[in-house]
Amino acid sequence: MPEELPGEAPVAGAQAAKAAKREADAAEAIAPARRRARTGAKDQGGGEAAAAGELSLADRAGAPNLGDDAPVMSTPRLTEGYRGLRALPPATLVFLQQLKEHNDRDWFNAHKKEYEAARDSVLELFKGVAQHLERIDTELGPQDPKACMFRIYRDIRFSNDHTPYKTCLSGAMARHGRKSPHACYYIHIEPGKSFIGGGMWMPEAAILRQLREAIAQGAGAEIRQCINRPEFKRHFGATSLFHEHDDRLKTAPTRFAKDHPFVDLLQLKSFTVGRKLSDDLLTSPALLETIVAALAEMMPFNQLLNSLSNLT
């Protein structure tokens, strides 16, 4: 068995410099959209309020509480001028709620048109999100919204639950598609249980091993720096990375010291964060802005995970 890693892992100057550059690159990527938003507001007579950084659509709409530790946002308007769908029609939530109450093939087939309308509305939302994320996260690459969506049909071959349909509409966007091992951006629409999130959920063994080795050698400081940014915490809370996972290890993994300074990160089996979306927000014009602003702040986190995993 390899020798146990020491309990101390100082961050090398090169690693600290890389972390600072990553954050600067992220800020530079988001900045053009923020500048366009402020300029557009001035051109439309926004005056001094726009010049000072007017509150986002979510703020002006009085965005509902999106989670136990998710305060009301105050972000620049990244989606200013977008003419596509900004909110889901109430009928989408009505269909999903009814599907939960009548989860059988006869009912579903009798309401196929309602399903198609609900699916198409979520697809339109995904198109808007993808269009903005492709500009903000230059590592993401082109996204096909249809390919991003998960099927509504459940795989019941090995399940005790034989209900045939999922009661949500969801999708993921990642470099090389949602089935790739790269960190993703995830959107989940389900009455009372909607949320957005991202990162790496249960990565394969080789990637998890690579992440843990990098964390132990100092990259844990980069992850902490990333998730402790004020804007990140505004969207995802101060402890989002940790309270999402009940299946984390109870102690340090084999080969790592139990008193390692990054033991809380080494114990993780998944590296994901998320925040809730209320039903009121789903049908509010603030929805698209809220999602894009939050996922934009997630970008440095996703890019860091991909880099530490040596994924290209």
Image: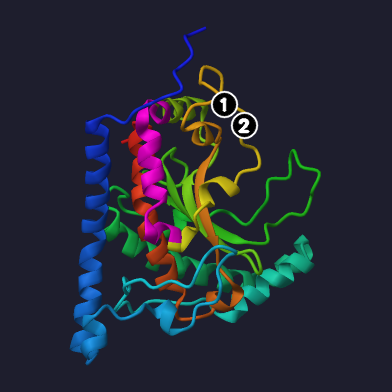
Q: Is residue 51 left or right of residue 234?
A: left
Residue visible at 51% across and 35% down in the picture: 203
Q: Is residue 190 left or right of residue 42?
A: right
Above or below — where is 311 with respect to 242? Answer: above
Q: Badge 2: how crowded within 10 Å, few (<14), some, or many (20+)?
A: some
- Asked whether residue 265 is drawn in magenta, I would say no
Residue 249's tag is 2
Residue 190's tag is none
User: In the orientation shown, which residue stands out farthest toward the top?
Assistant: 1
Above or below — where is 133 with respect to 74? Answer: above
Contact between marks 1 and 2 (CB within 8 A): the answer is yes
Helix, strand or loop at label 1? It is loop
Q: Position of residue 279 (x, y in %)?
A: 60, 74
Residue visible at 55% across and 53% down in the picture: 150
Residue 252's tag is 1
Q: Amino acid at mark 2?
A: Leu
Q: Is residue 266 left or right of residue 52?
A: right
Above or below — where is 3 with respect to 218? Answer: above
The one nearer the camera, 45 or 23, is 23
Residue visible at 81% across and 44% down in the picture: 160
Q: Amino acid at mark 1?
A: Ala
The answer to which image quadrant residue 215 occupies is top left
The one nearer the camera, 245 or 231, is 231
User: What segment carries the magenta color?
Assistant: 214-233
Looking at the figure, which quarter contains the C terminus? top left
Q: Position of residue 173 (x, y in %)?
A: 42, 52
The Cα atoms of the two marked residues, 1 and 2, are separated by 7 Å
Kindly tell me whether residue 50 is visible in this rendering: yes
Q: Position of residue 77 (x, y in %)?
A: 32, 74
